[in-house]
Image: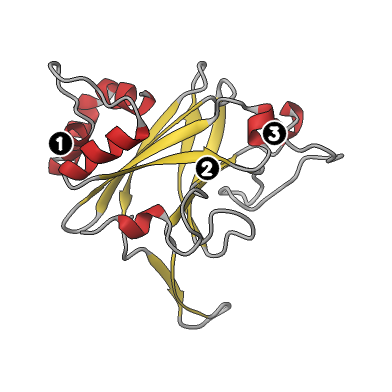
Amino acid sequence: MLIIKHLRRRAVTLATAGLAATAVASALSLTAASAAPETSASLASAARQSGAFAFSLVPSPGIKSCLPHAGGQVVVVPGSLNDLMAVAIHGMPANSDFDLFVIQQPLKPFGVSWYQTDIHADSHGNGFVTVRGIFDVETFSVSPGGTTTFAPTHQYHIGLWFNDPNLPFKLGCEPGATAPIVTPFNGEQHAGIQVLNTAQFPVDAGPLSDVHR
C-alpha cells in the first residue's frame, strides 16, 4: 500500500520520532521478512496490535468523476503526551498541494476546523506527511470568550482540501460552476474544495474517537 511505501522510504526520518515511529513501523508490518497488509481491514488490524489505529480517507462528493483513483490512508500512534499521525494520499494530480484539517463534521458545513499540515503530491500523484499533536478521543477546541464563544467541541474527523482553488475547477471537479469555488481551508483562507474526508464514519463518531492514549 502507498503508506507502506512511504514509511519504508522515511524509515530513518521516522526513527528520530522515537518509540512512536517504531510503533508505526510495527503496526504496518515493516520488516524485511513480513508482507505488508494488503487491505484497509488488515492494516487496521495490524495497527491495533501495536496500539495504533488505521483508517482510510475517502473521496468527497463529486471527486471520483474528476479524480477516479483519489484516496488516502491514516495511521495514528497514541503516545503518553501526544500522538503521531501519518497520512498518505494517492490518485492526485501530479505536483499538486493540499491542506489537511481536523474537523468536527466530515462534510459541509464541517463545523469547528483546525489546520494541521500541508501535503505535497509528487509527479505520480502520491503524498506523505507525519504530524504530532492530539489526535484521539481527547481532541477538542474551546473558546471561553473573546471574538467567538463556544463550549468544548470535539473534532474527530479528517478533511483534505485543494490548496489552489483553480486546480479542481480546471479538472472539472465543480460541474456547473462558472468560476473556481473558494473556501477558507488553507493558511491564506483561499483554498479550493474538499477532496478527501472520513465520511464513512458517523458524523458524531469520527475515527479519532476510536483512538485512546
Pick the front one: 10 or 146: 10
Q: Residue furthest bottom?
A: 145
Q: CA distance from mark 3 to mark 1?
A: 37 Å
Q: Quadrant of residue 96?
A: top right
Q: As displayed, is residue 25 above or below residue 146?
A: above
**Is residue 65 among what the camera can see?**
yes
Q: As displayed, is residue 96 above or below residue 116?
A: above
The answer to which of marks 3 and 2 sits earlier in the sequence is 2
Q: Position of residue 184 (x, y in %)?
A: 64, 53
* Residue that carries the numbered disc 1 in the rendered image: 22
The answer to which of marks 3 and 1 sits earlier in the sequence is 1
Q: Amino acid at mark 3?
A: Pro
Q: Secondary structure at mark 1?
A: helix
Q: As displayed, is residue 17 above or below residue 146?
A: above
Give the residue displayed 21% in from the left and 44% down from the top: 48
**Is residue 16 among what the camera can see?**
no
Q: CA distance from mark 3 to mark 2?
A: 14 Å
Q: Is residue 79 left or right of residue 161?
A: left
Q: Secondary structure at mark 3?
A: helix
Q: As displayed, is residue 19 above or below residue 82?
A: above
Disc 2 crowd rating (10 Å Cα; few below 14, some 14-19, many 20+) is many
Q: In this rendering, which labeled residue sits more in front, label 2 or label 1? A: 1
Q: Position of residue 107 (x, y in %)?
A: 59, 54
* Residue that carries the numbered disc 2 in the rendered image: 99
Q: Amino acid at mark 1?
A: Thr
Disc 1 crowd rating (10 Å Cα; few below 14, some 14-19, many 20+) is some
* Residue that carries the numbered disc 3 in the rendered image: 168
The answer to which of marks 2 and 1 sits earlier in the sequence is 1
Q: Secondary structure at mark 2?
A: strand
